[in-house]
Image: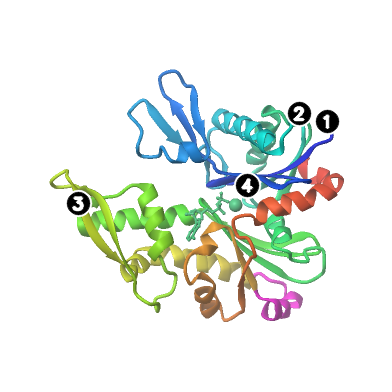
Amino acid sequence: MLSTLELGIDLGTANILVYSKNKGIALNEPSVVAIDTETKKVLAVGTEAKAMIGKTPGKIVAIRPLKDGVIADFDITTELLQHIMRKASKTLGFAIRKPNVVVCAPSGSTSVDRRAIQDAVRNAGAKKVHLIEEPVAAAIGAGLPVDEPVANVIVDIGGGTTEVAIISFGGVVACHSIRIGGDRLDEDIINYVRKVFNILIGERTAEHIKMEIGYALVDHEVKSMNVRGRDLVTGLPKTITLKSTEIQQAMKESLSHILEAIRATLEECPAELSGDIVDRGVILTGGGALLNGMEEWVSKKIDVPVHLAPNPLESVALGTGKALKYIDKLHSIAK
Ligand code: ADP
Ligand code: MG
């Protein structure tokens, strides 16, 4: 039982998920590691580490070792994966020894990036590591018939990147990847609040604002929210009230880049598949797809039906899990 275990891993910039055949999603935690800068020791990973962001004393830093969908810090990513595998073992109730792993690689990643992903997973204890194209995994996880000769359009809005792909016959026909995702929207909110109110807010507060009162659509029922930050003039804590309309404005430019990536990909669609897009629409996935009004906004802008995947935060992990069945077929991609 120990030796034949197979796992699917979604190594995301924002969240890391582990899928096992018998348990489904065994683990879902933020891709964050808290480190003591003096001893270089890992103090916490995942949810516990994310809770430390912006709140730790000087010698403890909370790091996100994945950036723009690829590995930015190899050693810390390996440590993150080791801890994650250990945590997953606990959930699964038995030791994971030398599993075979299917892990996703962003379509925009280089061969060096891909090799780094494979090596990090192997260093974390995996026996064989198979790579799968992330948009393909996302589409499989969203329940799309990727093997059929029809256009499946998937838009995966993650933390660091947005990947748009048209998949037909099991392969990527056209794709665009941009380094703009949910994190950029958080930054937009931080910058806006600093510029307009002279108040500094943290990343976690910005993400919270985005989820609560962030809207993709200009037209929406206006909401407001009280937010606390540090006044940059007095240095003291201050509470301000933010309106959803101003947050929409703050995120507008980044959102328009996401839309451009979708448009550019659709423009590259082979003529024979264009009709499918009108009939079948575009599927949104990734955590960023959960932004209020996202589906409606994209649909209005591109004039094509747009649907939200059933579990946007889990599509890729579910897809890697389903891909475990085709593990032999995937081997060729890994080389
Ligand atoms: P990754 O694949 O890069 O790990 P995810 O698909 O897990 O990313 O998505 C993470 C992003 O989704 C984060 O930027 C997060 O703020 C955003 N997100 C999650 N839930 C929501 C929500 N309800 N509204 C808006 N954004 C959200
Ligand atoms: Mg992702």
Q: CA distance from mark 4 to mark 1?
A: 31 Å
The one of 78 and 52 positioned closer to us in this rendering:
52
Residue on which the image places disc 1: 3
Q: What residue is shown with label 3?
A: 238
- The residue carrying mark 2 is 97
Residue 225 % position (x, y):
31, 63
Image position, residue 290 (x, y; %): 52, 63
Q: Which residues are magenta?
A: 268-281
Whether the residue under disc 4 has CB within 8 Å of ligand 2: no
- Let me know if residue 247 is in the magenta part: no
- Position of 98 relative to 322 (above/below): above
Q: Distance between the Cα atoms at labels 4 and 3?
A: 42 Å
How far is the residue under mark 2 from the one under mark 4? 29 Å
Q: Mainly helix, strand or loop, the magenta region?
A: helix
Q: Amino acid at mark 3?
A: Lys
Q: Which residue is mark 4?
A: 109
Ligand 1 within 8 A of label 2's CB?
no
Instruction: Specify whether residue 270 is painted magenta.
Output: yes
Residue type at the position of mark 2: Arg
* Residue ID at (82%, 69%): 149
Q: Are marks 2 and 1 in contact (CB under 8 Å)?
A: yes
